Image (cartoon, grey):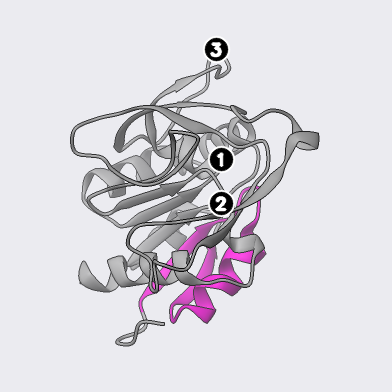
Amino acid sequence: MVTGPSPVVGVLAVQGDVREHLSALTAAGATARPVRRPSELDDLHGLVIPGGESTTIDRLARIFELHEPIRDLIADGLPVYGSCAGMIQLADQIVDGHADQQTFGGIDMTVRRNAFGRQVDSFEVDLPVIGIEDADRPFPAVFIRAPLVERAGPRVQVLAEVDGAAVAVRQGNLLATSFHPEMTPDRRVHALFVQMVRASF
């Protein structure tokens, strides 16, 4: 795990794997707290958008008046990590979204929702991930109704692929994975994000 000052990292807590991300971030050296209202975005050093249901996260973020503040923070350079539905929320464009579905955006990519199939098609695979600690040791990646990246812009670094499709990417201070690292005991993806947050101080 990385060492240094303990950054304050919020987890968007309107729906999804909030508790699991809070635990993983704490284990990776962050001070983690849930975010349910705009005032709780104040003084964050980073933000996680969890897995869940992307249309529900979008709808509730707008109801709770979090959508625009989060878009503004992303535009201002706040480090943000999105897993599964969170990857969809960080995409500038989505395929197979609902007609009125919006994203926070920030990563120059097009993401297809539920690209690997339904819940019954969930799977786990040992996956090499660029940038994590001990990167020669594969990461136990859990895919549940997961998206994939159909197009990545020139500033997007692909960190991991499954069958030639990008499933982990980074663009500047933004990190996204199709899979759910919070559902495993392996904290290396969260440690990478905490390291990114520390580097942005």
For disc 2, the marked residue is: 50
Q: Which residue sits at x=70%, y=45%?
A: 123
Secondary structure found at label 1:
helix
Q: How far apart are labels 3 and 2 at the CA level?
A: 22 Å
Residue 15 shown in magenta: yes
Q: Tell me, for residue 99, which label it has, or none.
A: 3
The amino acid pointed to by label 3 is Ala
The amino acid pointed to by label 1 is Ala
| Number of dots carrying numbers | 3
Q: Looking at the image, tell me whether mark 3 or mark 1 is earlier in sequence order.
A: 1
Q: Looking at the image, tell me whether mark 3 or mark 2 is earlier in sequence order.
A: 2
- The crowd level at tag 3 (other Cα within 10 Å; few <14, some 14-19, many 20+) is few
Q: Is residue 101 left or right of residue 173?
A: right
Q: Tell me, for residue 85, which label it has, or none.
A: 1
Q: Which residue sits at x=52%, y=22%?
A: 101
- Image coordinates for residue 76, horizontal then vertical, percent: 21, 49
- Which of pointers 3 and 2 indicates the residue nearer the eye? 2
Q: How far apart are labels 1 and 2 at the CA level?
A: 7 Å
- Image coordinates for residue 53, horizontal then vertical, percent: 65, 37
The residue lying toward the viewer, choosing from 100 and 2, is: 2
Q: Which residues are magenta?
A: 7-34
Residue 3 shown in magenta: no
Q: Residue furthest bottom?
A: 4
Secondary structure found at label 2:
loop
Q: Quadrant of residue 115?
A: top right
- The crowd level at tag 2 (other Cα within 10 Å; few <14, some 14-19, many 20+) is many
Secondary structure found at label 3:
loop
Q: Residue furthest right?
A: 120
Q: Tell me, for residue 128, which label it has, or none.
A: none
Q: Is residue 131 above or below residue 163?
A: below
Q: Quadrant of residue 141?
A: bottom right
